[in-house]
Amino acid sequence: MSISQRLVIKRQSLLRSTSLVSFMTFFSRVLGFARDMLMAYCFGAHAGADAFYVAFRIPNFMRRLFAEGAFSQAFVPVLTEYQKKHSPDEVRTFIARVSGQLGAVLSLITVIGILAAPAIIFIFAPGFGEGSTRTILATEMLRVTFPYLMFISLTAMAGAVLNAYGYYGVPALTPVLLNICMIVAIIYISPHFSVPVVGLAWGVFIAGIVQLLFQFPFLHRRGLLVRPRIYFGDPGVKKVLKLMVPALFGVSIAQLNLLVDQIFASFLPVGSVTWLYMTDRLTDFPLGVFGVAIATVILPHLSRRHIEADQHQFSNHLDWGLRFILLIGIPAGLGLMLFSMPMIATAFGYGEFDTIDVLKTQRSLITLSLGLPAFMIIKVLASGFYAKQDIKTPVKIGAFAMLANSLLCAALIWPLAHAGLTLASAIAGYVNAGLLLVWLLRRGWYKPQAGWPLFLLKTCIANTMMAIYLCYFVGHVDEWMAMPVSHRGLLLLSHISIAILIYIISLGALGMRVSDFRHSMKE
């Protein structure tokens, strides 16, 4: 089979593609919870855990920027343009030159990051204090975890290529390998270190290499595996870099806000960074399974509609994405708020992670869950701008939202401690989402379809029915902490399943059907 025969875009509907990515991401997130449960049991919320979460959050933040945000938002529209206007050989050359230049830049950044690890830790966790145990451990572990940035960024590029050709499953499954490597590190590597948590940092390093190598056979099978080339004169590469640099900020404002939260949290008592990390992990579950999945799938579709100058379908795609996000994001945020304590107790309330830690994490989870629908909406709305290759508007909006978050953090940290930081992020999320929506409407890129008031009314009623059930069965923290591990898990799963069933039945009784969202929208 020739290269041109293999370089064919796989055709399938938005709903089917989103379902596939969501399922793969769900599997990864479930394994991620198993990893975090093991971490909480072994390391609790002590100084070593705080140090690791800072050292891990920095490259992991970059993973989110690239794998779930800026690089894909900049690279996919340009790659889509090449697919439409250039030959398969020219597309392969473009991919080779992008990967070569990206690899060179990332190598330089990695070397600088390792050498400047003490300064980076001071920037992201100034409250740890110079010479403290947390600072020393975080610096040591960051030098091990920082190369993960290079490996996972190249992995993200490989995944973006596969996504652009309609192959979503492998990139969505790849994060499973990170969780497997970290679990193996906890069990088999950490015991060999005098400070066991340092073994986790080596697990992250190994995971970066494994995830990158995992992509190669799938790229090769589709004729997309090319040797990187460094060529600075390629106009396509210049266009990607021009779009990517501001997109690093604009599309990932929610994660930047969480980093701001971490800086403030480093001045709070020991354990605050860990409580925020656990909060982020729980909200990241629906955000990754649905928000990122929908944004990942919808971006190539929007890019093609833009290139074809089909503004009507472009708007319809955005409308579909927003409705689907709200249908899932609102009950997800509500469920996390109302059932926060049972979820935290079941996921992390073991070993070194005690009742106090559960209650402290609950406070921040409640406030951050308020912003979950906004964080998910941002993923879809930002895709509308990046498909149009408009970078400036999201960056300006993101800068304003980040400023608002920083001011709110400073105002809310004193009365609400770490929960005030997550509340600030939630409010800033709505500011960001609201402004993105206003600009899309003003420019005429998005025109809402008919039926929004009725859709919102049905969604509100169904969420109310679900909320009544959750409030009645939430229980007390002592009851949940006293249950055996298996009992907690089964009971939580039962309540969540019943709540979801109530929500679905309520929507059905109100006349909402799956067929309402089964847009073919094939390319």
Image: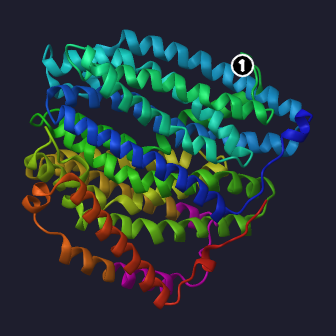
Examine the structure image and report whether residue 459 is included in the region drawn in magenta.
Answer: yes
Q: Which residue is rendered at x = 42% and y = 65% of the image?
A: 329
Quadrant in the picture for residue 490: bottom left
Numbered disc 1: secondary structure: loop
Is residue 393 visible from the viewing direction of this image? Answer: yes
Left or right of residue 370: residue 288: right
- Quarter of the image containing the C terminus? bottom right
- Residue pictured at 62% horizontal, 63% vertical: 443
214 or 228, which is in the foreground?
214
Dot 1, crowdedness within 10 Å: few (<14), some or many (≥20)? Answer: some
Residue 399 in sight here: no
In screen coordinates, is 51 left or right of 82? left
Left or right of residue 151, residue 356 in this image? left
Q: Which residues are magenta?
A: 439-463
In the displayed structure image, the side of residue 365 where residue 142 appears, left or right: right
Taking the spot 28% from the left edge, 21% from the top edge, the residue there is: 190
Q: Residue drawn 63% across and 47% down?
A: 169
Identify the residue under disc 1: 228
Tell which of 114 and 518 is nearer to you: 518
Image spot of residue 11 (x, y percent): 78, 56
Seen in the picture, residue 379 relative to 505 is either above or below; the reply is above
What quarter of the picture does the N terminus occupy?
Answer: top right
Instruction: Tell me which amino acid carries mark 1.
Output: Pro
Count of numbered circles on the image:
1
Q: Please, is residue 340 above or below residue 238 in the view?
A: below
Q: Is residue 16 magenta?
A: no
Please provide percent x and percent y for residue 109: 49, 17
How far from the left and from the top, in percent, is residue 442?
Answer: 57, 66
Give coordinates of residue 185: x percent, y percent. Answer: 35, 25
Specify the principal SS of the magenta part: helix
